[in-house]
Image: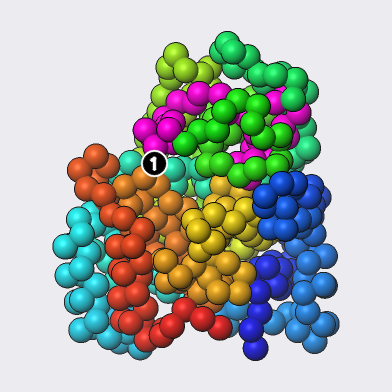
Amino acid sequence: MKISRRQFLALTAAGLAGAPPLALAAAPAAGDAADASAALPSAAAAASAAAPASQASAPSLADLADPPVWPGAEWERIDPDKLGWSPDDLDDVHAYAASIGTASLLIVQHGRVVDSFGEIAARREINSVRKSLLSALIGIAVAEGKIDLDATLGSLGIDDRPPALSETEKQATVRELLQARSGVYHPALYETAAEKRLRPARGSHAPGSFWYYNNWDFNVLGTIYEHAVGASIFDSFAQRIATPIGMQDYRARDGRYVRGADSIHPAYPLHMSARDLARFGLLYLRRGQWRQRAIVPAAWVAESTTGVSPTRGGDAEYAWLWWAGLPDSGAAGLKLPPGAFWAEGHGGQYLIVDPLNDMVVVHQTVAGRTRVSAPAMGRLMGLIHDAAGIGAPMV
């Protein structure tokens, strides 16, 4: 049976007992991506609409582990042979990873480390993967009533250096910033040369009507979050996520702020090890729950990883600070099946979550030294699938 990604996430999210309910229904988007940005139901409502009652408790592979395996102070490793992985094909994975400049690669399936390459304890610059970490923190703050997704920039007192925001730009909402659809094209910190070159003209698109990968949106979300909770992103992540899930290497001082003349809203890059990123990926694979504790609301996990805006030539969708494959076909370029979603950073930083195969993959390079392209990452994922005996990424 073929199911869409939205149905898959709705079904699995609905199965998590005790998840705090969230009012996350998204406002319809206008313009060129209106169909992809149509209103999303809450996770519980989506589950009811996605399948008949007899299917409402359909398990994912993660649900089939009895009981589910969680890492302790250290990750537990398993002999790949026991899970049907091919050692010879894993040798091919290692050889290709070495050839493209991979610094760290970690593969987790069913809660255990299947394979690794490089130094997985090294804290490395994760670039834009940080945005998905912020999405999790914002989801917690929304559940606690500290952030209103429909609050506008104007109501929150958000502005920037001259030329200041127009009254139209100030109508953009927190939700639209999360989706990179604010319509505010003010210069931003930590932009790449390509992002600066491609940035639309100010006032060219109304809030909510157009998708553009916009560092201004992402940086302002950091400002909004810190004002809402009264703490830094880095301290909050340590307290609310890193410590509860047992991250081994992360420290709040591993983050820093990038400030400059272009904007008053700083960027917030940080370093993280592959083995710590894998714990965050497992947290999302398990729908925000760690052992018996709900860390991130399950409804937020489902909603925020469901694509909103088609991008990359129709091969992927942008969600809420996450990337997602297409509902029925996954992401062909990265060779990911339906249901998969990922965080991605400049230079080849990836955190891939694949619920269909109960798998998390972390890939890191050394920032500024090597760059792994999306096609190269897709080839690496294809080799990983070959080693796992997964086959074509389809359902």
Q: How many marks?
A: 1
- The image shows residue 335 at horizontal and vertical percentages of 42, 71
Residue lying farthest to the top in this orientation: 162
Q: Secondary structure at mark 1?
A: helix
- The image shows residue 159 at horizontal and vertical percentages of 64, 18
- The image shows residue 192 at horizontal and vertical percentages of 38, 34
Residue stretch in magenta: 169-197
Categorize mark 1 by other alpha carbons within 10 Å: few (<14), some (14-19), many (20+). many
How does the figure colour the protein chain or chains?
A: rainbow
Q: Is residue 229 visible?
A: no
Q: In this rendering, is residue 304 above or below 117?
A: above
Q: Is residue 295 magenta?
A: no
Residue at 24% over, 81% down: 89
Looking at the rendering, which quadrant does residue 206 occupy?
top right
Q: Nearer the viewer, residue 183 or 40?
A: 183
Looking at the figure, which quarter contains the N terminus?
bottom right
Q: Nearer the viewer, residue 296 or 52?
A: 52
Q: Is residue 339 left or right of residue 153?
A: left
Looking at the rendering, which quadrant does residue 116 occupy?
bottom left
- The image shows residue 114 at horizontal and vertical percentages of 33, 74
Residue at 67% over, 35% down: 205
Q: In this rendering, is residue 66 above or below 304?
A: below
| Residue, disc 1 | 127
Q: In this rendering, is residue 139 above or below 183?
A: below
Q: Amino acid at mark 1?
A: Asn
Q: Nearer the viewer, residue 203 or 212?
A: 203
Q: Is residue 165 visible?
A: yes
Residue at 77% over, 74% down: 50
Q: Nearer the viewer, residue 261 or 95?
A: 261
Q: Is residue 193 left or right of residue 371?
A: right
